[in-house]
Amino acid sequence: MPTVVALIPARAGSQRVPGKNVALLGGHPLIAWSIASARESGIFTDVVVSTDAGEIAEIARRYGAEAPRLRPPEMSTATSSDIEWVLHAMEGRDEQAFAILRPTSPFRTAATIRRAVDRLVELDGRADSVRAVERTKQHPGKMWTVDGDLIVPLLPQPEGETPLHSRQYQALPEVWVQNSSLEIAWAHVLEGPLPTISGARVAPFFTEGAEGFSVDYPGDLERAEQMLASGQATLPRPLG
């Protein structure tokens, strides 16, 4: 098994759901559940939280993660790219791979993580990374752009056939959308003149059930609580 470090990004300035990384779910801060599943997986050398806020760093340590240094403000804006904070968090580390586990996916379990790492290893160098995906509910075949007074299909339409936008969903090509559950990559993607978090060869990791659920919009926390109450989802055991 390769050496892998877990990276949990948790900047303070969320705009759509202010303070979401430390908002309570099931009586604990949202970030606690990602720390718990990472530790429970038994996969990682360390669980490292990358944050620009001392308060979040303290909460992370309380639940068993490391927060060795604060992320610089210029890497913590709403438009900052992931590669910036990943390089900052990986500086001086020598693990063979890294996993990005966003706090917004509380129902990602230790078993989910182990399954994803196993998938990357099984690919035996044929992929640089695996990324969580799920079937899209809003199909791009039914999306449009505005051109003056008219709308134009986003995707090229097949000639001599029924347009994509006029087909039933089941008759459209399968399309998968990434979700926030996880990304796991070999560390070599961070090397060279144009480092990335995923490399050029990305393999799918198909999330199941609530694994791909993410707290991204107002009302998502309430929905998460409802999922817990109804048994649609379960949380890992908090280790703090």
Image: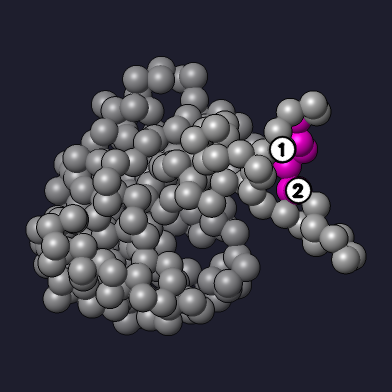
**Where is the N terminus found, in terms of image quarters?**
top left
Nearer the observer, 62 or 157: 157
- Secondary structure, mark 1, is loop
Q: Quadrant of residue 165?
A: top right
Name the spot of residue 23 as percent of width and height, x first: 29, 78
Using the image, determine if residue 150 lies above or below residue 166.
Answer: below
Name the spot of residue 131 as percent of width and height, x first: 45, 40
Q: Residue at x 49, y 19 (%)?
A: 126
Q: Residues within 10 Å of mark 1 (few under 14, many from 20)?
A: some
Amino acid of disc 2? Pro
- N-terminal-most mark, 2 or 1: 2
Q: Residues within 10 Å of mark 2 (few under 14, many from 20)?
A: some
Say if the magenta span includes residue 113. no
- Secondary structure, mark 2, is strand
Using the image, determine if residue 15 lies above or below residue 204.
Answer: below
Q: Residue at x 54, y 51 (%)?
A: 138
Nearer the observer, 217 or 235: 217
The disc placed on residue 163 is: 1
Asked whether the beta carbons under mark 2 and mark 1 sit within 8 Å of each other, the answer is yes
Amino acid of disc 1? Pro
Task: Write the start and end of the magenta stretch as one range.
Answer: 153-158
Q: Quadrant of residue 31?
A: bottom left
Tell me: 55 left or right of 228: right
Q: Which residue is mark 2?
A: 153
Say if the magenta span includes residue 154. yes
Q: Residue at x 39, y 35 (%)?
A: 205
